[in-house]
Amino acid sequence: MSNYAMISDYVVSGNENGVVNEVNAALSGNAAPLEIINDGLLTGMNVVGEKFANGEMFVPEVLMAARAMNAGMDIVKPLLAEGDVTSLGTVVIGTVKGDLHDIGKNLVVMMLESAGFKVVNLGVDAKKEAFVEAAKENNADIVAMSAMLTTTMTYMDEIIKTCKDAGIDAKYMIGGAPVTPAYAEKISAIYTADASTAAEKAKALV
């Protein structure tokens, strides 16, 4: 079994030490850092995304897998040459004002990063001004919002209007338990059901 396949397997099983050992072994065998990322770490994370979407893996396991992948990334990233990593685009993401739910959004962040996006994470309780500022500063291609409460969901509309008024030319993605495709359509946003579909839809948008 190649180092890459082993790295991928260890990511899927959330084995942080296994990932670190295999990444170091691959590097000592002169493997290219970018190949370790693409053929090992991200391949594993793609499997995790599929299993999560199919209900074969659950949030705690996905978080463990992400932690294992990030441990590998921490070793490899400093070795990348400038220009090695081409980003698909920039996503500004946050849980909207009044809402402190983080896990779903963080899963989306991980899936987006695995897919090759640069992600600017505004955290929770993010106000519309923060979205506008981050989108402008980072020239965002996509502005993504999460809400887990019906009471905070309506704030998404305000964020989109404020961004548009500020002249931000981005696509808008929304998700979270109370969010429906109908609501997304009403506020001119794209609905995402879960973390793996969020990454797929983001790829289709850029």
Image: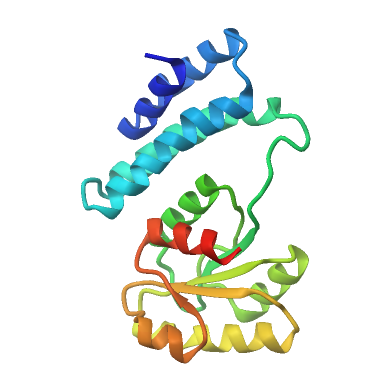
Q: Quadrant of the N terminus?
A: top left
Residue furthest out toward the left: 56
Name the residue nearer the viewer: 30 or 145: 30
Q: Residue at x 42, y 40 (%)?
A: 45
Name the residue nearer the viewer: 115 or 135: 115
Image vertical order of residue 161 relative to residue 33, above or below: below
Q: Position of residue 186 (x, y in %)?
A: 45, 91
Image vertical order of residue 137 relative to residue 48, above or below: below
Image vertical order of residue 200 relative to residue 24, above or below: below
Q: Position of residue 196 (x, y in %)?
A: 39, 56
Residue furthest out toward the front: 204
Q: Residue at x 48, y 37 (%)?
A: 42
Q: Position of residue 167 (x, y in %)?
A: 75, 83
Colouring of the image: rainbow
How many numbered circles does the render carry?
0
Q: Residue at x 46, y 51 (%)?
A: 111
Q: Quadrant of the C terminus?
A: bottom right
Residue furthest out toward the top: 29
